[in-house]
Image: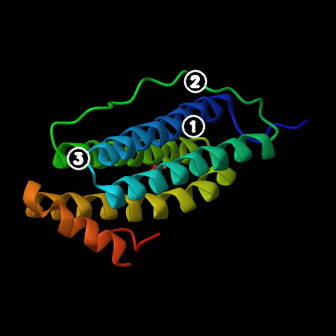
């Protein structure tokens, strides 16, 4: 089978798949932590985010297969499972989204350098998705900060009312 992407690009995509699966596990851990704090809507929000991250990993895996490239998956580090506060939990999510954004931008730069139009084109979807996810995580962080511990039930109310960060997906 013809391979449409270079070894360098393939290696960078394998690492990206690892970041997406890590994000999924990190969000599962944040979701479980919120559930334990008695905040079910924040828990559901992060459970939904975990599913989206798994879908991102699958999207990259499909791309590898579609380009006729052998698939390799990296080891995944353990996520952080306990947090000092809701603010810290959401900050962990935002920081990881920023890291994923940097990684996707670097992947795009590499594809551009390699003259790889297929990968550049496929990454456009992820670039738009990162804008939405960083913006949504940042909005949630601001909300949780403003709410403080006593106001987290208001965040719960907001997330349950169809006006959740990220458009209530
Ligand atoms: Fe798939 Fe939110 O990075």
Give the alpha-carbon distance from disc 1 to disc 3, as whole Å.
22 Å
- Closer-to-camera residue (51/98): 51
Position in image of residue 52 (x %, y %):
53, 54
Disc 2 packing (10 Å; few <14; some 14–19; many ≥20): few
Q: Position of residue 130 (x, y in %)?
A: 43, 57
Toward the viewer: 71 or 121? Answer: 71
Q: What residue is at 39 percent from the left and 38 percent from the top?
A: 29
Instruction: Give the residue drawn at x 55%, y 61%.
Output: 124
Q: Secondary structure at mark 1?
A: helix
Q: Which mark is residue 91?
A: 3
Q: Is residue 34 above or below residue 168?
A: above
The residue that disc 2 covers is 74
* Disc nearer the start of the sequence (1/2): 1
Asked whether disc 1 touches disc 2, contact meaning CB atoms under 8 Å apart, the reply is yes
Please identify, in this view, whether the residue under mark 2 or under mark 3 is nearer the observer: 3
At a point 46% along the width and 37% down the height, the residue shown is 25
Q: Is mark 1 within 8 Å of ligand 1?
A: no
Where is the N terminus found, in terms of image quarters?
A: top right
| Mark 1 vs 3, N-terminal side | 1
Residue 116 in sight from this viewpoint: no
Residue occupying the far right of the picture: 1
Residue 17 image label: 1
Which callout, 1 or 3, points to the residue nearer the camera?
Answer: 3
Residue at coordinates 57% horizontally, 37% vertically from top-left? 17
Rendered view: 112 above or below 73: below
Q: Is residue 62 visible?
A: yes
């Amino acid at each position: 089978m013809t391979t449409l992407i270079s070894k360098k690009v393939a290696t960078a995509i394998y690492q990206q798949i690892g970041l997406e699966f890590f994000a999924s596990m990190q969000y599962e851990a944040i979701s479980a932590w919120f559930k334990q704090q008695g905040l079910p809507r924040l828990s559901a929000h992060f459970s939904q985010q975990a599913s989206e991250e798994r879908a991102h990993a699958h999207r990259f895996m499909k791309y590898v297969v579609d380009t006729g490239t052998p698939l390799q998956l990296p080891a995944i580090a353990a996520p952080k499972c306990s947090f000092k506060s809701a603010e810290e939990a959401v900050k962990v999510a935002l920081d990881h989204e920023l890291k994923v954004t940097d990684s996707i931008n670097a992947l795009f730069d590499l594809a551009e350098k390699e003259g790889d139009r297929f990968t550049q084109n496929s990454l456009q979807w992820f670039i738009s998705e990162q804008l939405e996810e960083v913006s949504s995580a940042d909005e949630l962080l601001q909300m949780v900060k403003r709410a403080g511990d006593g106001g987290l039930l208001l965040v719960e109310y907001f997330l349950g009312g169809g006006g959740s960060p990220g458009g209530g997906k």
